[in-house]
Amino acid sequence: MGFYAGPVISLIVIIVVAWLLLKKVYPHAVLLAAGLLMLVLAFTFKFELPPIKEPTGFFGFDLFRYIKESFGKINAKVGLMIMAIGGFVAYIDKIGASNVLVNLAMKPLAVFKKYPNIAAIFVIPIGQLLFITIPSAAGLGLLLMASVYPILIRLGVSKLSAVSVITAGTAFGVGPASAITASAVSIAGENGILYFINKQIPLIIPLNIVFMVCYFFTNRYFDKKDGKTKKNIPVKLEKKTDAPLIYAIIPVFPLILLIVFSELFSIFSQKITLDTTTAMFISLFVAMLFEWVRLRSLKKVLESLKVFWNGMGNIFKTVVTLIIAADIFAKGLIALGFIDGLVLMSQNMGFGYVGIGIVMTVVIYLAAMMMGSGNAAFFAFGPLIPDIAVKFGIQSSSILLPMNLAASMGRTVSPVAGVIIAVSEIAGVSTLGIVKRNFIPIGIALIFLLILHFI
């Protein structure tokens, strides 16, 4: 087989996978089957296969050995981290801490009662701040629909404008609690909190400003085009909670721990290091102590731990298994020379790492749009980057960082994304209507991201 045969086969498989995902076929099965198929094709056409720590001696069995090793590798590292995050998010939602934080964060909007369109765009940075500590796009979207959406409607903001800015607040998956960021940090071998502070924050601040400006003018244009009136009927969505105000600190407690005990500070004479997973477990027990003081029932508090374990289990069966399937998919792409093909194409076009960085960022953005999941897109293509970085003699994070942001941005313009479907059903608007409002601001922000990072 010629050099280009492998990349061409890979591209055909990617197109078929994209088509199946658009047809809403179960993504875990699609990615796993496609990865195994590419490994079989690589073996058949005598391409170099990814190494196995303990080969069985028979390729047919080695295929399943790849799956076993992916389970072991991922569960021991990023999988456990993401499960701990998922369990903690489920727990703080159960005890009402998420609602307290969201309600508190939305109070500043009262200042803009006379300026509804300005109030609407300020939801974006507030939502982004919340998304750092509540890293579930659909979960945060629903919380914002229950708290800020009725406020915006009463102010006179149209339904589509309101839901568009709410979904925009989940457009950047950043911070140590983000599954995409956790994966990026694991792949790049970097410190999570330093990656967040030194690399993500300098990008998302200007990107949020671009968002606010773009959404202001885009929504104003579409509202005029759609003939929006201010006779919106408020929707009663507020989820009441009897959790005290101090509970607002619980969702941000892991972030506080990670920052205080990071390399940014030297508060203690003895060096203390803290990883994200440990911070989540510490924060869980702090939350349980809060609950014990509030409920005065040790039995109820101990029983509430089931919520955490169930949250971990739900994340395992949805996100972690998706990472494993995507890891096999990535192995198949590597085996067929997809990486080498991209590198050669970039070199022939004379772009170097900048060219391939832009290509991979756009590819992952489009993949997230089709899959409706930033996680799925990043988990499929993120593991390919270290090999590319080595070939160009650069740090993996140089390409992973814009891919990290593009993956979550792509989800925001996907009509099959969980967050888009969830908020559209509550607001009674179409998913395509939301995507139409999001498409221009997200597209402009993507171009701005590429210019800001690569040029």
Image (cartoon, grey):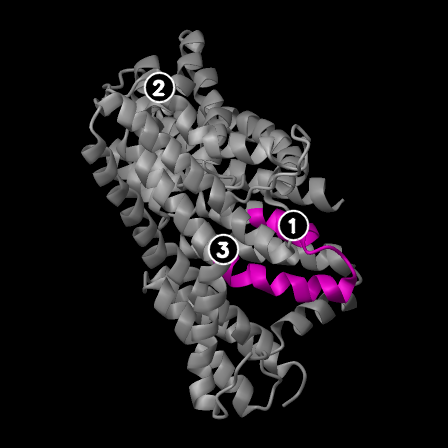
> Magenta stretch: residue 64 in it?
no
Q: Looking at the magenta stretch, what is its main secondary structure?
A: helix
Q: Which residue is mark 3?
A: 78
In the rendered view, tell whether residue 124 sits above or below residue 31. above
Find numbered disc 1 in the image and state the secondary structure of the residue it sits on: loop
The answer to whether any part of residue 433 appears in the image is: no
Q: Which residue is mark 2?
A: 152
* Range covered by the magenta-colored residues: 377-404
Under mark 3, the amino acid is: Val
Q: Earlier in the sequence, mark 2 or mark 3?
A: 3
Find numbered disc 3 in the image and state the secondary structure of the residue it sits on: helix
In the rendered view, tell whether residue 294 sits above or below residue 414. above
Where residue 410 appears, as percent x and y from the top left, is 49, 48
Q: Which mark is residue 190?
A: 1
How many neighbours does mark 3 have within 10 angstroms: few (below 14), some (14-19), or many (20 or more)? many
Q: Is residue 92 left or right of residue 192?
A: left
How many neighbours does mark 1 have within 10 angstroms: few (below 14), some (14-19), or many (20 or more)? some
In the rendered view, tell whether residue 72 sits above or below residue 311. below
Disc 2 and disc 3: Cα gap in Å?
A: 38 Å
Where residue 381 appears, as percent x and y from the top left, is 55, 61
Under mark 2, the amino acid is: Leu
The residue shown at (32%, 60%) is 24
The residue shown at (48%, 44%) is 278
